[in-house]
Image (cartoon, rainbow, N blue to C red):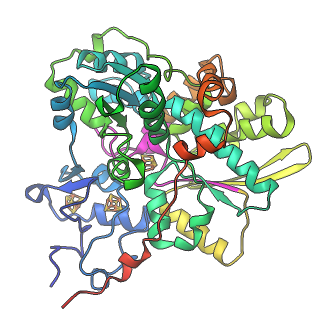
Protein backbone atom coordinates (compact mmCIF):
# COMPACT_ATOMS: atom_id res chain seq x y z
CA UNK A 1 0.00 0.00 0.00
CA UNK A 2 1.24 3.48 -0.84
CA UNK A 3 2.39 5.79 1.95
CA UNK A 4 0.82 8.63 -0.08
CA UNK A 5 -2.81 9.00 0.94
CA UNK A 6 -5.53 10.12 -1.50
CA UNK A 7 -3.07 10.09 -4.40
CA UNK A 8 -5.93 9.42 -6.82
CA UNK A 9 -7.28 12.95 -6.16
CA UNK A 10 -4.19 14.97 -5.29
CA UNK A 11 -0.46 15.14 -5.93
CA UNK A 12 1.72 12.98 -3.72
CA UNK A 13 4.51 14.98 -2.02
CA UNK A 14 7.62 13.55 -0.35
CA UNK A 15 8.59 14.75 3.14
CA UNK A 16 12.06 15.66 1.87
CA UNK A 17 10.79 17.72 -1.10
CA UNK A 18 12.90 20.91 -0.90
CA UNK A 19 10.44 23.09 -2.83
CA UNK A 20 6.94 22.41 -1.52
CA UNK A 21 5.08 20.79 1.38
CA UNK A 22 1.50 20.11 2.40
CA UNK A 23 -0.35 20.89 5.63
CA UNK A 24 -2.65 17.87 5.91
CA UNK A 25 -5.07 19.67 8.20
CA UNK A 26 -5.95 22.14 5.43
CA UNK A 27 -6.43 19.73 2.53
CA UNK A 28 -10.04 19.41 1.33
CA UNK A 29 -9.15 16.82 -1.41
CA UNK A 30 -10.41 19.12 -4.15
CA UNK A 31 -8.06 17.81 -6.85
CA UNK A 32 -6.84 21.21 -8.10
CA UNK A 33 -3.18 20.30 -7.48
CA UNK A 34 -3.56 17.06 -9.41
CA UNK A 35 -5.11 18.84 -12.40
CA UNK A 36 -2.40 21.46 -12.74
CA UNK A 37 0.38 18.93 -12.22
CA UNK A 38 -1.10 16.60 -14.83
CA UNK A 39 -2.29 18.98 -17.54
CA UNK A 40 -0.03 22.01 -17.23
CA UNK A 41 3.16 20.33 -16.04
CA UNK A 42 2.69 16.83 -17.40
CA UNK A 43 4.19 15.23 -14.29
CA UNK A 44 1.29 13.65 -12.33
CA UNK A 45 0.02 10.68 -14.34
CA UNK A 46 3.29 10.30 -16.25
CA UNK A 47 4.80 7.94 -13.70
CA UNK A 48 3.41 5.27 -11.43
CA UNK A 49 4.11 5.09 -7.71
CA UNK A 50 4.18 1.29 -8.10
CA UNK A 51 7.15 1.65 -10.46
CA UNK A 52 9.08 4.32 -8.55
CA UNK A 53 9.24 2.47 -5.23
CA UNK A 54 6.42 4.69 -3.94
CA UNK A 55 8.49 7.84 -4.53
CA UNK A 56 6.57 10.89 -5.72
CA UNK A 57 8.12 12.62 -8.74
CA UNK A 58 8.14 16.41 -8.62
CA UNK A 59 9.92 19.08 -10.65
CA UNK A 60 9.44 21.66 -7.90
CA UNK A 61 7.54 24.28 -9.90
CA UNK A 62 5.09 25.05 -7.10
CA UNK A 63 2.14 25.50 -9.45
CA UNK A 64 0.12 23.21 -7.16
CA UNK A 65 0.62 25.74 -4.36
CA UNK A 66 -0.68 28.52 -6.62
CA UNK A 67 -3.97 26.71 -7.26
CA UNK A 68 -4.55 25.16 -3.82
CA UNK A 69 -7.66 26.96 -2.53
CA UNK A 70 -6.91 26.40 1.15
CA UNK A 71 -3.15 27.06 1.06
CA UNK A 72 -2.59 23.50 2.18
CA UNK A 73 0.35 23.31 -0.24
CA UNK A 74 2.96 26.03 0.18
CA UNK A 75 6.60 26.51 -0.61
CA UNK A 76 8.95 25.02 1.97
CA UNK A 77 9.67 28.07 4.08
CA UNK A 78 13.23 29.28 4.54
CA UNK A 79 12.54 32.85 5.61
CA UNK A 80 12.91 32.16 9.32
CA UNK A 81 16.36 30.65 8.67
CA UNK A 82 17.23 33.76 6.66
CA UNK A 83 16.10 36.07 9.47
CA UNK A 84 18.32 34.08 11.83
CA UNK A 85 21.33 34.25 9.52
CA UNK A 86 20.88 38.00 9.17
CA UNK A 87 21.82 38.30 12.86
CA UNK A 88 25.24 36.73 12.20
CA UNK A 89 28.46 38.68 11.58
CA UNK A 90 28.83 37.20 8.08
CA UNK A 91 28.60 39.41 4.98
CA UNK A 92 24.99 39.04 3.83
CA UNK A 93 24.42 39.57 0.11
CA UNK A 94 20.96 39.54 -1.47
CA UNK A 95 20.01 39.34 -5.13
CA UNK A 96 16.47 39.90 -6.39
CA UNK A 97 14.92 38.29 -9.48
CA UNK A 98 13.19 40.32 -12.22
CA UNK A 99 9.64 39.04 -11.65
CA UNK A 100 9.33 39.81 -7.93
CA UNK A 101 9.38 43.60 -8.46
CA UNK A 102 6.15 43.58 -10.46
CA UNK A 103 4.23 41.30 -8.06
CA UNK A 104 5.28 41.93 -4.44
CA UNK A 105 3.17 45.11 -4.32
CA UNK A 106 0.02 42.94 -4.59
CA UNK A 107 0.70 41.77 -1.02
CA UNK A 108 0.38 45.41 0.07
CA UNK A 109 -2.71 46.54 -1.84
CA UNK A 110 -0.89 47.75 -4.93
CA UNK A 111 -1.87 46.90 -8.49
CA UNK A 112 -0.29 43.92 -10.26
CA UNK A 113 2.56 45.18 -12.43
CA UNK A 114 3.55 48.06 -10.13
CA UNK A 115 7.34 48.23 -10.08
CA UNK A 116 8.46 48.18 -6.43
CA UNK A 117 12.16 47.42 -6.96
CA UNK A 118 13.39 50.50 -5.04
CA UNK A 119 11.22 49.58 -2.06
CA UNK A 120 12.50 45.99 -2.12
CA UNK A 121 16.10 47.21 -1.96
CA UNK A 122 15.23 49.43 1.04
CA UNK A 123 13.50 46.56 2.84
CA UNK A 124 16.50 44.27 2.35
CA UNK A 125 18.89 46.93 3.67
CA UNK A 126 16.61 47.51 6.64
CA UNK A 127 16.58 43.83 7.62
CA UNK A 128 20.37 43.61 7.51
CA UNK A 129 21.69 43.15 3.96
CA UNK A 130 25.27 44.31 3.49
CA UNK A 131 24.86 44.38 -0.29
CA UNK A 132 21.82 44.15 -2.56
CA UNK A 133 22.34 43.10 -6.17
CA UNK A 134 19.91 42.73 -9.03
CA UNK A 135 19.55 39.32 -10.69
CA UNK A 136 18.77 41.16 -13.92
CA UNK A 137 22.57 41.52 -14.07
CA UNK A 138 22.79 37.70 -13.93
CA UNK A 139 20.17 37.62 -16.70
CA UNK A 140 22.35 39.84 -18.92
CA UNK A 141 25.29 37.57 -18.18
CA UNK A 142 23.18 34.54 -19.10
CA UNK A 143 22.34 36.08 -22.48
CA UNK A 144 26.03 36.80 -23.16
CA UNK A 145 26.96 33.19 -22.47
CA UNK A 146 23.89 31.43 -23.90
CA UNK A 147 23.91 33.29 -27.21
CA UNK A 148 27.67 32.73 -27.57
CA UNK A 149 26.98 29.02 -27.03
CA UNK A 150 24.16 29.07 -29.61
CA UNK A 151 26.36 30.75 -32.23
CA UNK A 152 29.15 28.28 -31.45
CA UNK A 153 26.73 25.37 -31.99
CA UNK A 154 25.48 26.88 -35.26
CA UNK A 155 28.98 27.55 -36.59
CA UNK A 156 30.40 24.19 -35.58
CA UNK A 157 27.51 21.89 -36.46
CA UNK A 158 26.71 21.40 -32.77
CA UNK A 159 23.48 19.90 -31.46
CA UNK A 160 20.34 21.89 -32.28
CA UNK A 161 17.78 22.93 -31.31
CA UNK A 162 19.40 24.39 -28.24
CA UNK A 163 17.08 24.66 -25.24
CA UNK A 164 17.32 27.42 -22.63
CA UNK A 165 18.37 26.17 -19.20
CA UNK A 166 17.43 28.97 -16.83
CA UNK A 167 14.30 27.21 -15.51
CA UNK A 168 15.36 24.46 -13.06
CA UNK A 169 11.98 22.71 -13.29
CA UNK A 170 12.39 22.41 -17.05
CA UNK A 171 15.94 21.08 -16.60
CA UNK A 172 14.66 18.50 -14.12
CA UNK A 173 11.81 17.57 -16.47
CA UNK A 174 14.35 16.79 -19.21
CA UNK A 175 16.65 14.90 -16.83
CA UNK A 176 13.79 12.67 -15.64
CA UNK A 177 11.47 12.25 -18.64
CA UNK A 178 13.60 13.02 -21.73
CA UNK A 179 17.29 12.43 -20.91
CA UNK A 180 17.98 11.84 -24.62
CA UNK A 181 17.55 15.61 -24.99
CA UNK A 182 20.16 16.54 -22.33
CA UNK A 183 22.70 17.47 -25.06
CA UNK A 184 20.18 20.01 -26.36
CA UNK A 185 20.12 21.91 -23.06
CA UNK A 186 22.34 24.96 -22.94
CA UNK A 187 25.15 24.39 -20.46
CA UNK A 188 24.51 27.81 -18.91
CA UNK A 189 23.71 27.97 -15.22
CA UNK A 190 20.57 29.90 -14.31
CA UNK A 191 20.95 33.66 -13.65
CA UNK A 192 20.86 33.37 -9.83
CA UNK A 193 23.62 30.77 -9.92
CA UNK A 194 25.75 32.71 -12.39
CA UNK A 195 25.42 35.69 -10.09
CA UNK A 196 26.09 33.57 -6.98
CA UNK A 197 29.26 32.25 -8.58
CA UNK A 198 30.48 35.75 -9.49
CA UNK A 199 29.73 36.99 -5.96
CA UNK A 200 31.63 34.17 -4.27
CA UNK A 201 34.53 33.96 -6.72
CA UNK A 202 35.06 37.52 -7.98
CA UNK A 203 33.30 40.03 -5.75
CA UNK A 204 34.88 38.34 -2.69
CA UNK A 205 38.34 38.88 -4.25
CA UNK A 206 37.93 42.53 -5.17
CA UNK A 207 36.49 43.26 -1.73
CA UNK A 208 39.10 41.11 -0.03
CA UNK A 209 36.51 39.03 1.81
CA UNK A 210 37.02 35.33 2.52
CA UNK A 211 34.24 33.68 0.52
CA UNK A 212 33.49 31.41 3.48
CA UNK A 213 32.33 34.57 5.23
CA UNK A 214 29.75 35.41 2.60
CA UNK A 215 26.12 34.32 2.76
CA UNK A 216 24.16 34.77 -0.45
CA UNK A 217 20.39 34.91 -0.49
CA UNK A 218 18.25 35.02 -3.63
CA UNK A 219 14.71 36.40 -3.54
CA UNK A 220 12.87 34.74 -6.40
CA UNK A 221 9.36 34.00 -7.69
CA UNK A 222 10.41 30.37 -7.83
CA UNK A 223 9.98 27.37 -5.55
CA UNK A 224 12.13 25.23 -7.82
CA UNK A 225 15.23 27.27 -7.11
CA UNK A 226 15.07 26.06 -3.51
CA UNK A 227 16.05 22.61 -4.76
CA UNK A 228 18.27 23.87 -7.59
CA UNK A 229 20.75 25.56 -5.23
CA UNK A 230 21.26 22.26 -3.42
CA UNK A 231 22.62 20.53 -6.53
CA UNK A 232 26.14 19.47 -5.62
CA UNK A 233 27.72 21.04 -8.72
CA UNK A 234 26.69 24.54 -7.60
CA UNK A 235 29.05 24.57 -4.58
CA UNK A 236 26.69 26.51 -2.31
CA UNK A 237 27.18 29.63 -4.46
CA UNK A 238 23.65 30.57 -3.40
CA UNK A 239 23.00 29.68 0.24
CA UNK A 240 19.29 30.45 0.56
CA UNK A 241 16.30 31.05 -1.68
CA UNK A 242 13.19 32.79 -0.43
CA UNK A 243 10.11 33.46 -2.54
CA UNK A 244 8.25 36.71 -3.15
CA UNK A 245 5.58 35.49 -0.70
CA UNK A 246 8.22 34.78 1.94
CA UNK A 247 9.63 38.28 1.54
CA UNK A 248 6.10 39.59 2.17
CA UNK A 249 6.00 37.48 5.36
CA UNK A 250 9.30 39.02 6.49
CA UNK A 251 8.00 42.53 5.80
CA UNK A 252 4.93 41.86 7.96
CA UNK A 253 6.89 40.12 10.71
CA UNK A 254 9.34 43.03 10.91
CA UNK A 255 6.49 45.58 10.89
CA UNK A 256 7.89 47.43 7.89
CA UNK A 257 5.59 50.02 6.32
CA UNK A 258 6.12 48.78 2.75
CA UNK A 259 3.81 51.23 1.07
CA UNK A 260 5.64 54.22 2.50
CA UNK A 261 9.23 53.02 2.70
CA UNK A 262 11.59 55.25 0.68
CA UNK A 263 13.15 53.74 -2.39
CA UNK A 264 16.85 53.02 -2.70
CA UNK A 265 19.18 51.72 -5.40
CA UNK A 266 21.05 48.48 -5.95
CA UNK A 267 24.76 48.23 -5.23
CA UNK A 268 27.26 48.11 -8.03
CA UNK A 269 29.05 45.98 -9.44
CA UNK A 270 26.02 43.80 -10.05
CA UNK A 271 23.17 46.24 -9.74
CA UNK A 272 22.50 47.25 -13.32
CA UNK A 273 21.04 45.53 -16.30
CA UNK A 274 19.78 46.19 -19.76
CA UNK A 275 16.05 46.17 -20.46
CA UNK A 276 16.58 42.70 -21.86
CA UNK A 277 17.64 41.46 -18.40
CA UNK A 278 14.39 42.72 -16.88
CA UNK A 279 12.09 40.86 -19.29
CA UNK A 280 13.67 37.51 -18.33
CA UNK A 281 10.82 37.23 -15.83
CA UNK A 282 8.11 36.73 -18.43
CA UNK A 283 7.53 34.06 -21.07
CA UNK A 284 9.42 34.98 -24.24
CA UNK A 285 11.70 37.39 -22.42
CA UNK A 286 14.79 35.19 -22.55
CA UNK A 287 14.21 34.63 -26.27
CA UNK A 288 13.68 38.32 -26.99
CA UNK A 289 16.74 39.42 -25.01
CA UNK A 290 18.79 36.69 -26.71
CA UNK A 291 17.69 37.64 -30.21
CA UNK A 292 18.96 41.18 -29.66
CA UNK A 293 22.45 39.80 -28.98
CA UNK A 294 22.23 37.21 -31.79
CA UNK A 295 21.58 40.12 -34.14
CA UNK A 296 24.58 42.02 -32.81
CA UNK A 297 26.90 39.02 -33.13
CA UNK A 298 25.79 38.17 -36.66
CA UNK A 299 25.72 41.70 -38.08
CA UNK A 300 27.88 43.83 -35.82
CA UNK A 301 24.95 46.26 -35.63
CA UNK A 302 22.55 47.15 -32.82
CA UNK A 303 19.11 45.55 -33.16
CA UNK A 304 16.36 47.49 -34.89
CA UNK A 305 13.03 48.49 -33.35
CA UNK A 306 11.37 45.16 -34.33
CA UNK A 307 13.79 43.28 -32.09
CA UNK A 308 13.28 45.77 -29.28
CA UNK A 309 9.61 44.81 -29.36
CA UNK A 310 9.57 41.25 -30.66
CA UNK A 311 5.79 40.71 -30.60
CA UNK A 312 5.79 37.13 -31.98
CA UNK A 313 7.44 35.84 -28.79
CA UNK A 314 5.38 37.97 -26.38
CA UNK A 315 2.05 37.08 -24.76
CA UNK A 316 0.67 34.14 -22.83
CA UNK A 317 0.07 31.56 -25.60
CA UNK A 318 1.53 28.25 -24.57
CA UNK A 319 3.53 27.71 -27.75
CA UNK A 320 4.81 30.68 -29.76
CA UNK A 321 6.83 30.35 -32.93
CA UNK A 322 8.88 32.89 -34.86
CA UNK A 323 11.47 33.08 -37.57
CA UNK A 324 14.36 35.43 -37.07
CA UNK A 325 15.68 36.52 -40.43
CA UNK A 326 19.05 38.21 -40.16
CA UNK A 327 20.51 39.25 -43.47
CA UNK A 328 19.40 36.08 -45.21
CA UNK A 329 20.17 33.74 -42.31
CA UNK A 330 17.04 32.20 -40.79
CA UNK A 331 16.72 31.01 -37.21
CA UNK A 332 13.60 29.02 -36.28
CA UNK A 333 12.48 29.85 -32.77
CA UNK A 334 9.92 28.49 -30.33
CA UNK A 335 8.83 29.73 -26.91
CA UNK A 336 6.96 27.30 -24.69
CA UNK A 337 5.46 27.84 -21.28
CA UNK A 338 4.27 24.86 -19.29
CA UNK A 339 6.15 21.56 -19.43
CA UNK A 340 2.87 19.97 -20.55
CA UNK A 341 3.21 21.76 -23.88
CA UNK A 342 6.95 21.17 -23.90
CA UNK A 343 6.21 17.42 -23.79
CA UNK A 344 4.11 17.77 -26.94
CA UNK A 345 6.92 19.59 -28.75
CA UNK A 346 9.53 17.09 -27.54
CA UNK A 347 7.45 14.23 -28.95
CA UNK A 348 7.24 16.04 -32.29
CA UNK A 349 10.99 16.67 -32.25
CA UNK A 350 11.56 12.97 -31.58
CA UNK A 351 9.39 12.09 -34.58
CA UNK A 352 11.07 14.77 -36.68
CA UNK A 353 7.71 16.46 -37.30
CA UNK A 354 9.12 19.89 -36.40
CA UNK A 355 12.51 21.50 -36.33
CA UNK A 356 13.82 24.56 -34.58
CA UNK A 357 17.18 26.16 -33.83
CA UNK A 358 16.47 27.68 -30.43
CA UNK A 359 13.72 26.94 -27.91
CA UNK A 360 12.87 28.76 -24.68
CA UNK A 361 10.97 26.72 -22.11
CA UNK A 362 9.57 27.91 -18.80
CA UNK A 363 7.73 25.42 -16.61
CA UNK A 364 5.22 27.94 -15.27
CA UNK A 365 2.52 29.19 -17.62
CA UNK A 366 3.38 32.82 -18.28
CA UNK A 367 6.97 32.35 -17.10
CA UNK A 368 8.39 33.45 -13.75
CA UNK A 369 5.82 36.24 -13.29
CA UNK A 370 3.49 33.32 -12.51
CA UNK A 371 6.06 31.33 -10.53
CA UNK A 372 5.10 29.05 -7.66
CA UNK A 373 6.27 31.56 -5.05
CA UNK A 374 4.49 34.63 -6.38
CA UNK A 375 1.69 36.44 -4.47
CA UNK A 376 -1.72 34.84 -4.61
CA UNK A 377 -3.57 37.51 -2.70
CA UNK A 378 -5.83 37.90 -5.73
CA UNK A 379 -6.90 34.29 -6.27
CA UNK A 380 -6.81 32.59 -8.71
CA UNK A 381 -3.84 34.14 -10.50
CA UNK A 382 -5.74 34.97 -13.69
CA UNK A 383 -4.46 35.71 -17.19
CA UNK A 384 -5.27 39.36 -16.49
CA UNK A 385 -2.95 39.45 -13.47
CA UNK A 386 -0.22 37.64 -15.38
CA UNK A 387 -0.63 40.13 -18.24
CA UNK A 388 -0.29 43.12 -15.91
CA UNK A 389 2.85 41.70 -14.28
CA UNK A 390 4.28 40.97 -17.69
CA UNK A 391 3.53 44.50 -18.94
CA UNK A 392 5.23 45.84 -15.81
CA UNK A 393 8.44 44.15 -17.00
CA UNK A 394 8.05 45.34 -20.60
CA UNK A 395 7.65 48.90 -19.27
CA UNK A 396 10.90 48.55 -17.32
CA UNK A 397 12.59 47.38 -20.54
CA UNK A 398 11.22 50.35 -22.47
CA UNK A 399 12.36 52.83 -19.84
CA UNK A 400 15.92 51.50 -19.50
CA UNK A 401 18.60 53.61 -21.19
CA UNK A 402 20.34 50.42 -22.23
CA UNK A 403 18.22 47.71 -23.87
CA UNK A 404 20.96 45.22 -24.84
CA UNK A 405 23.08 43.08 -22.50
CA UNK A 406 26.33 43.77 -24.37
CA UNK A 407 25.95 47.51 -23.66
CA UNK A 408 25.71 47.03 -19.89
CA UNK A 409 28.83 48.71 -18.49
CA UNK A 410 28.97 46.33 -15.51
CA UNK A 411 28.91 43.35 -17.87
CA UNK A 412 31.63 44.87 -20.07
CA UNK A 413 33.77 45.49 -16.97
CA UNK A 414 33.27 41.94 -15.71
CA UNK A 415 34.55 40.48 -18.98
CA UNK A 416 37.40 43.00 -19.26
CA UNK A 417 38.56 42.62 -15.68
CA UNK A 418 37.91 38.95 -15.02
CA UNK A 419 36.14 36.61 -17.44
CA UNK A 420 38.10 37.74 -20.54
CA UNK A 421 35.36 37.08 -23.10
CA UNK A 422 32.01 35.29 -23.40
CA UNK A 423 32.35 31.50 -23.48
CA UNK A 424 36.00 31.72 -22.40
CA UNK A 425 37.56 28.92 -20.38
CA UNK A 426 37.12 30.94 -17.20
CA UNK A 427 33.49 31.74 -18.05
CA UNK A 428 32.93 28.06 -18.71
CA UNK A 429 34.32 27.05 -15.34
CA UNK A 430 32.23 29.55 -13.39
CA UNK A 431 29.05 30.00 -15.40
CA UNK A 432 28.35 26.67 -17.10
CA UNK A 433 27.31 23.27 -15.78
CA UNK A 434 26.43 19.68 -16.68
CA UNK A 435 23.28 17.60 -16.30
CA UNK A 436 22.46 14.11 -15.12
CA UNK A 437 20.22 11.42 -16.60
CA UNK A 438 17.70 10.85 -13.79
CA UNK A 439 15.28 8.65 -15.70
CA UNK A 440 16.11 5.69 -13.44
CA UNK A 441 13.86 7.18 -10.74
CA UNK A 442 10.88 6.36 -12.95
CA UNK A 443 11.66 2.67 -12.71
CA UNK A 444 13.06 2.21 -9.26
CA UNK A 445 11.75 -1.18 -8.25
CA UNK A 446 10.65 -1.72 -4.65
CA UNK A 447 13.27 -3.54 -2.60
CA UNK A 448 11.97 -6.56 -0.70
S1 LIG B 1 -5.28 21.59 -4.12
FE1 LIG B 1 -4.88 21.77 -1.94
S2 LIG B 1 -6.82 21.32 -0.97
FE2 LIG B 1 -6.99 20.61 -3.08
S3 LIG B 1 -6.38 18.44 -2.99
FE3 LIG B 1 -4.55 19.60 -3.46
S4 LIG B 1 -3.59 19.98 -1.46
FE4 LIG B 1 -5.72 19.39 -1.07
S1 LIG C 1 5.54 21.33 -7.56
FE1 LIG C 1 4.93 21.12 -9.72
S2 LIG C 1 5.64 19.07 -10.27
FE2 LIG C 1 5.65 19.16 -8.04
S3 LIG C 1 3.68 18.34 -7.42
FE3 LIG C 1 3.43 20.56 -7.58
S4 LIG C 1 2.69 20.93 -9.65
FE4 LIG C 1 3.51 18.86 -9.60
S1 LIG D 1 9.26 29.33 -14.91
FE1 LIG D 1 10.44 30.59 -13.52
S2 LIG D 1 9.35 30.50 -11.58
FE2 LIG D 1 8.61 28.79 -12.84
S3 LIG D 1 9.89 27.05 -12.23
FE3 LIG D 1 10.84 28.00 -14.02
S4 LIG D 1 12.34 29.44 -13.18
FE4 LIG D 1 10.93 28.90 -11.53
Look at the image and give the residue range highlighted in magenta: 358-387
Q: Please tell me in which quarter of the rendered image ligand 2 is found.
A: bottom left
Q: How many marks?
A: 0
Indicate whether 148 appears above or below 89. Answer: below
Q: Is residue 383 magenta?
A: yes
Q: Position of residue 1 (x, y in %)?
A: 15, 85
Q: Position of residue 103 (x, y in %)?
A: 38, 31
* Residue sitting nearer the eye, 107 or 78: 78
Q: Tell me which residue sits at (53%, 68%) in the image.
A: 343
Which quarter of the rendering shows the C terminus? bottom left
Quadrant location of residue 148? Answer: top right
Can residue 246 be seen?
Answer: yes
Q: Is residue 329 left or right of residue 118?
A: right
Give the farthest residue toward the left: 25
Tell me which residue sits at (15%, 21%) in the image.
254
Task: Give x and y (percent) for residue 155.
Answer: 81, 54
Image height of 32 relative to 124, above or below: below
Residue 313 visible in the displayed image:
no
Q: Is residue 242 above or below residue 134?
A: below
Nearest to the observer: residue 173 or residue 439: 439
Question: In the image, is 78 to the left or to the right of 387?
Answer: left
Residue 29 appears at what percent x and percent y? Answer: 18, 65
Amino acid sequence: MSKHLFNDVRVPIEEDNLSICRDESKCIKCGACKSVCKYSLSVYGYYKLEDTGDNAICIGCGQCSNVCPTRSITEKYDYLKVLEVLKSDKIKIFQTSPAIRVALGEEFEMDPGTNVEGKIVSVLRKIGADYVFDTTFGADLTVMEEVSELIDRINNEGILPMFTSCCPSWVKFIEIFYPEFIPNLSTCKSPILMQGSIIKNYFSKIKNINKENIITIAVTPCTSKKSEIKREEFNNDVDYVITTRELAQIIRKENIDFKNIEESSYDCIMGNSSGGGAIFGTSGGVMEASCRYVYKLLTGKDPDSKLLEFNEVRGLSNIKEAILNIEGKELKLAVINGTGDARKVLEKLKNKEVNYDFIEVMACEGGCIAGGGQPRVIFPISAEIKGKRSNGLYNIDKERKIRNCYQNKEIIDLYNNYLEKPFSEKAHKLLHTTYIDKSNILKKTVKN
